[in-house]
């Protein structure tokens, strides 16, 4: 078995749109923390990093519901996450945030290299647009009836009742959740 000199450990990045709960802690962070502590006791050179995921539709939806801004939402939950992890003793060497410039630059560099190598398939697709909100809608901004089980509250990407993966165009009677506007 090959012995490595350094180890990098991370856990799932918590989405900065709501507080952590025991399932997050027990499922993602505690097992990794135990492993990291064990490796440190064994004298290994190990780094445990993580950070708040501060991008995505769920954050903007939360901001609209709370009559706030996405930045206020991510700041609030990032700080809450850091405090929670500290209080329960999770031993991150670094806890960061995806909104930092270095993460934008790094992800763009990865994308650009893969794109220049032709690793992506480009496709055109239709996307719903909400006239009242004056925006194109991400899947989570669309709800309607699930075509598979009839659930009236299915999202544009999945039905939480039957577990089916969906496309927004498959929904029956789709509406924009941002303004509750019919899309047809």
Image: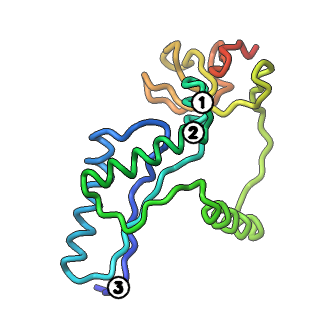
Q: CA distance from mark 1 to mark 3?
A: 47 Å
Label disc, if present, on residue 23 of the rendered structure = none
Position above or below: 95 against 136: below
Q: Nearer the viewer, residue 88 or 32?
A: 88
Tag 1 and tag 2, C-beta contact below 8 Å: yes
N-term mark: 3 or 2: 3
Q: Residue at x 42, y 53 (%)?
A: 12
Name the residue that disc number 2 marks.
72
Q: Quadrant of residue 168?
A: top right
Residue at the (35%, 85%) spot, across then down: 4
The secondary structure type at the circle numbered 3 is loop
Q: Which residue is mark 3?
A: 4
Q: Residue at x 59, y 20 (%)?
A: 143
Is residue 24 or residue 126 the one in the foreground?
Answer: 24
Q: Position of residue 64 (x, y in %)?
A: 61, 26
Q: Nearer the viewer, residue 62 or 144?
A: 62
In the structure shown, which secondary structural element does the residue marked by tag 2 occupy?
A: helix
Residue, disc 1:
68
Q: Are marks 1 and 3 in contact (CB under 8 Å)?
A: no
């Amino acid at each position: 078995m090959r012995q490595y000199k350094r180890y990098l450990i991370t856990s799932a990045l918590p989405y900065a749109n709501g507080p952590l709960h025991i399932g997050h802690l027990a499922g993602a962070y505690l097992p990794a923390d135990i492993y990291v502590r064990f490796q440190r006791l064994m004298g290994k050179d190990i780094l445990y990093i993580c950070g708040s995921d501060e991008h995505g539709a769920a954050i903007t939806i939360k901001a609209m519901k709370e009559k706030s801004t996405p930045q206020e939402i991510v700041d609030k939950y990032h700080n809450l996450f850091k405090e929670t992890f500290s209080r329960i003793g999770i031993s991150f060497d670094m806890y960061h945030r995806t909104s930092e410039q270095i993460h934008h630059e790094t992800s763009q560099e990865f994308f650009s290299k893969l794109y220049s190598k032709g690793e992506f398939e480009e496709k055109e697709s239709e996307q719903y647009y909400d006239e009242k909100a004056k925006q194109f809608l991400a899947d989570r901004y669309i709800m309607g009836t699930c075509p598979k089980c009839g659930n009236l509250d299915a999202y544009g990407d999945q039905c939480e009742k039957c577990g089916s993966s969906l496309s927004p165009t498959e929904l029956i009677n789709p509406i924009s959740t941002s303004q509750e506007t019919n899309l047809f």
